[in-house]
Amino acid sequence: MATTPLGLFAIDGLLSDEERAMRDTVRAFVDARVRPHLADWYDAGTLPARDLARELGGLGVLGMHLEGYGCAGTSATAYGLACLELEAADSGLRSLVSVQGSLAMFAIWKWGTEEHKQTWLPRMATGEAIGCFGLTEPDFGSNPAGLRTRAVRDGDAWVLTGTKMWITNGSIADVAVVWAQTDEGIRGFVVPTDTPGFTAPEIKRKLSLRASVTSELVLDGVRLPADAVFPEVRGLRGPLSCLDEARFGIVFGSLGAARDCLETTIAYAQQREIFDKPLAAYQLTQAKLADMSLELGKGMLLALHLGRLKDAGHLATEQVSLGKLNNVREAIAIARECRTILGAAGITLEYPVLRHANNLESVLTYEGTSEVHQLVIGRALTGEAAFR
Ligand SMILES: Cc1cc2nc3c(=O)[nH]c(=O)nc-3n(C[C@H](O)[C@H](O)[C@H](O)COP(=O)(O)OP(=O)(O)OC[C@H]3O[C@@H](n4cnc5c(N)ncnc54)[C@H](O)[C@@H]3O)c2cc1C
């Protein structure tokens, strides 16, 4: 009697009824509404993000772990499980939700004024308004401390000038959270994207995350009212607090991509006959499947442990790094190994495996590269910061 990779680990028994219900709702949505179209969207390099955002808002997934302002206020673990189901479809879909909920909405929820929150959060929770998060610049990715976008006071106004790069949802956003240098260090600004001087050209010809909108943000003398700035937070503490949220979602999400690869591959190996018997009946194949299932299950146990720590209010930055480093690294290894089992069939969009592997190249890089997470963990272990 065959079981699934996560079934082997009896993961369901570790989830509450509410968590299982949320997971099943998102999985059903993804299967009905997203999966049938993914290969075409990926091939064309598009995503109907506005329509999907409204539907995801209707499901209560956008900013779901935040309290108030129309957000569902679920546990962090339930949010993680939703990310897993979304990324089982495609990392681009999970990126849409992560950037909306964990980066743009969280930044406003955590650091914004009451007016920022009232203006944006209810509309972002329903998917009526889309947000993006502009931290990375052409010359500053892993080292955002050096960013060059500048905000200067001009009478009562702020004027922003600079360029952001690789910004998810940029061209479709109604509001951008933009981090800029000021005389008091790095500060965050809430920028309506219809403000004169703001443009967001889309980045094309991507080989990864093709079903996701990625853009440049050009700020050419963007003039904002005095209250557009987050009032309290100064320095990298602001953006890094948001990155921890999004990284947490990736700890779970990356496992969704891996699970989809593994389940697809097991089904393929069971029906593919080679040398007169199913590929699944060969010891070499089973060794691969066993090793991959082990890594998937271990990653899931780690994700749930981190989820419980977060729900208890005890999750530290370096622990998020443990999860992001391990789970994305193992997910991409699983996707590549699965591709070998599919043979030539694995290189097409008929199967999701190479699509996931290609997507995970981006996931490996954004929200802190593997090397950056190794350095965060290394600092925690030794007390020595080796970033520079
Ligand atoms: C599809 C996609 C979507 C994205 N969405 C967003 C978004 O919405 N908002 C946003 O702000 N950013 C976004 N990013 C940007 C992303 O966060 C950056 O790409 C990431 O931080 C890495 O920066 P970089 O690409 O400039 O690489 P670099 O910083 O140039 O790094 C290049 C290499 O150097 C390594 N490296 C860096 N520091 C060290 C060190 N101290 N020692 C050894 N090696 C080191 C890195 O690990 C990497 O391997 C996105 C990126 C992608 C690909």
Image: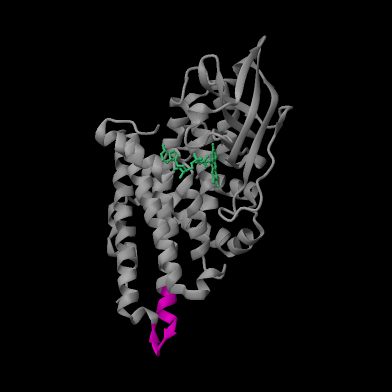
Q: In which quarter of the image is the N terminus?
A: bottom left
Q: Position of 351 compared to 301: left or right?
A: right
Q: Does the magenta portion include 99?
A: no
- Compared to residue 72, the image places residue 1 above or below, namely below
Location of residue 168 in the rendering, given as x and y in whole percent from the top left corner? 58, 42
Report the residue that reaches farthest toward the left. Answer: 382
Q: Position of 388 compared to 216: left or right?
A: left
Q: Does the magenta portion include 274?
A: yes
Q: How is the image coloured?
A: one colour
The residue located at (41%, 36%) in the rendering is 244
Report the residue that reaches farthest toward the right. Answer: 196
User: Toward the viewer: 374 or 44?
Assistant: 374
Q: Quadrant of residue 336?
A: bottom left
Q: Is residue 90 visible?
A: no
- Compared to residue 270, the image places residue 141 above or below, namely above
Q: State the extent of the magenta-drawn residues as a range.
A: 267-278
- Compared to residue 110, the image places residue 381 above or below, namely below
The residue located at (64%, 49%) in the rendering is 51
